[in-house]
Image: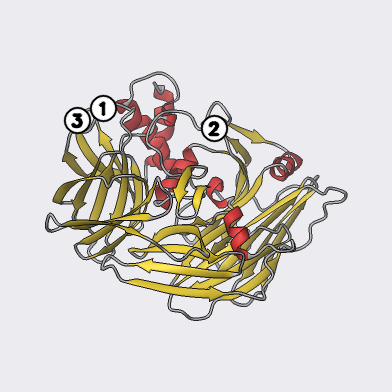
């Protein structure tokens, strides 16, 4: 149990962070941790309604919550046979489609539900031909998108499904572009080697997520694909949905003085049309901020091994270990940070905080995750896809995946606060991000109540736990097994 001192210490952090229960609904779920249950949230941007898809290996239970958090309805359906993870969804009015991958790995299963009637339909989607390879899939603006690539080529294909079963197919051919110095490394080869992580850019993504070498961001009516398969540069690839020709821009990381060191790591992150690049070796590090629109370098920070990181606003922190997800210690020297980053996966994450920008700079090293609970379809999960069995880089719910990765990762990092317009360093405190506040609150006030057992409770997910964002507020969903109710708790 947490000590009284720990609880008191957390009070200041939550004095301006409300965590009210906004919805609770009576229901009976299994108490067994072996009964794997998950929750996939769908937020209707037009009505504000929330559809909570509670699932296990046998059934699908759709719980509809109104925009005012009133109970709107509930329906129970058998889960389609031979299905595994939920890949995404499509929603139009009362028509909801849920997309699953299958054990056979050759097709995607679609479950079509009419939320106002008992009507449903199940079909299997055959996407593309034999010459196309599955890359990834996700939901964007309540449509389901599948990205494929023509075998051994630089040609990408976007398939978009709406809940009305409309299908659009858009091809982007980048023949003539060289995405790697390695002979024969086509874009399809690179993306199959480093599966893209879909990034929700308005949340404080942890370094586990942003350490992916290829990432997909949404930008208005297009997708932006970033490639960091080469350590010296980043490729930024625009993929419009409307068939407008895509474009490729390359951004060099810039020079850092590594001396005789040949071991270095690099990565990037896209935020509000600015590219943040991080490059590190044992002797030096550099952060370069460039405008994607103009290609100009706006700001650059460099640090040598014996120097001080004068643009950091926090200590250098190492979090997580092979045995304890909550392990934490401070590193006092720049050279410690450089050495650890050089031997791990360099990563950088950026998110807004009040009127400024927070930049998290560091590296991530994967650790074995312990504890029972539901599979979150998180980084490192082996799943079957239309392209064969792959290790997934991301989740159908990027907000919950980011939150889950925050709880179970080993990272070394510091945080820096920048001014919004100039990217100059801004002194002062960096406040805890939303994920950390939710994690702390959950451990003290929720998890202990639901799991009165010894050991590390942070490794035990809540039953049917989920996290999503609506109107700039976060909502934690979970099953309160003591009171037999499903609960939504608002954090703001």
Q: Where is residue 49 in the image (x, y as percent from the top left)?
A: 22, 58
- Label 3: state its secondary structure: loop
- Label ID, residue 347: none
What residue does disc 1 label?
31
Residue 323, can we see it? yes
From the viewer's perspective, is residue 264 above or below residue 455? Answer: below
Q: CB of mark 2 within 8 Å of CB of mark 1?
A: no
Residue, x 41% and y 22% (percent of image)?
3
Q: Position of residue 203 (x, y in %)?
A: 45, 54
Give whichever of 100, 236 is nearer the camera.
100
Q: Where is residue 156 in the image (x, y as percent from the top left)?
A: 53, 69
Residue that extends furthest to the front in the rendered view of this protein: 130
In which image quadrant can residue 440 be found? top left
Residue 392, can we see it? no
Q: How many labels does the image show?
A: 3
Q: Nearer the viewer, mark 3 or mark 2?
A: 2
The tag earlier along the polypeptide, 1 or 3, is 1
What residue does disc 3 label?
483
In which image quadrant can residue 477 be found? top left
What is the distance, in whole Å, between disc 2 and disc 1 at their CAs? 25 Å
What residue does disc 2 label?
368
**Left or right: where 321 falls relative to 139:** right
Q: Which of marks 1 and 3 is in front?
A: 1
- Label 1: state its secondary structure: loop
Residue, x 60% and y 72% (percent of image)?
292
């Amino acid at each position: 149990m947490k000590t009284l001192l720990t609880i008191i210490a957390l009070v200041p952090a939550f004095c301006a962070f409300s965590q009210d229960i906004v919805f609770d609904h009576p229901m009976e779920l299994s108490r067994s941790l072996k009964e794997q249950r998950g929750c996939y949230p769908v937020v209707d941007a037009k009505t504000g309604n929330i559809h909570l898809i509670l699932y296990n290996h046998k059934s699908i239970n759709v719980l509809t919550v109104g925009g005012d958090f009133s109970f709107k309805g509930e329906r129970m359906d058998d889960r389609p046979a031979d299905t595994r993870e939920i890949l995404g969804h499509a929603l139009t009015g009362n028509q909801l489609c849920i997309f699953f991958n299958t054990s056979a790995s050759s097709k995607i299963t679609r479950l079509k539900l009419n939320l106002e009637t008992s009507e449903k339909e199940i079909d299997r989607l055959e996407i593309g031909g034999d010459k196309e390879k599955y890359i990834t899939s996700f939901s964007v603006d309540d449509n389901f998108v599948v990205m494929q690539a023509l075998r051994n080529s630089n040609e990408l294909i976007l398939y978009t499904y709406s809940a009305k079963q409309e299908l659009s197919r858009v091809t982007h051919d980048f023949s003539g572009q060289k995405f790697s110095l390695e002979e024969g490394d086509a874009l399809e080869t690179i993306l199959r080697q480093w599966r893209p992580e879909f990034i929700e850019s308005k949340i404080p993504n942890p370094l586990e997520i942003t350490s992916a070498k290829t990432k997909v961001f949404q930008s208005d009516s297009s997708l932006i694909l970033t490639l960091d398969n080469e350590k010296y540069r980043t490729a930024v690839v625009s993929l419009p949905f409307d068939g407008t020709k895509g474009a490729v821009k390359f951004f060099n990381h810039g020079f850092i003085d590594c001396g005789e060191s040949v071991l270095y790591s690099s990565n990037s992150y896209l935020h509000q049309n600015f590219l943040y690049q991080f490059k590190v070796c044992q002797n030096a590090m550099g952060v370069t901020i460039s405008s994607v629109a103009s290609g100009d370098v706006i700001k650059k920070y460099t640090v040598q091994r014996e120097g001080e990181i004068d643009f950091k606003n926090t200590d250098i922190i190492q979090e997580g270990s092979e045995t304890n997800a909550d392990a934490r210690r401070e590193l006092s020297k720049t050279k410690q940070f450089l050495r650890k980053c050089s031997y791990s996966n360099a990563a950088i994450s950026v998110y807004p905080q009040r009127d400024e920008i927070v930049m998290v700079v560091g590296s991530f090293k994967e650790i074995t995750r312990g504890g029972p609970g539901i599979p979150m379809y998180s980084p490192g999960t082996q799943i079957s896809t239309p392209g064969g069995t792959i290790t997934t880089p991301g989740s159908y719910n990027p907000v919950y995946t980011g939150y889950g990765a925050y709880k179970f990762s080993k990272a070394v990092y510091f945080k820096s606060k920048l001014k919004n317009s100039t990217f100059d360093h801004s002194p002062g405190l960096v406040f805890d991000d939303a994920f950390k506040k939710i994690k702390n609150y959950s451990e003290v006030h929720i998890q202990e109540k639901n799991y009165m057992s010894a050991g590390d409770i942070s490794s035990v997910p809540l039953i049917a736990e989920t996290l999503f964002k609506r109107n700039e507020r976060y909502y934690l969903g979970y099953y309160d097994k003591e009171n037999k109710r499903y609960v939504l708790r608002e954090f703001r």
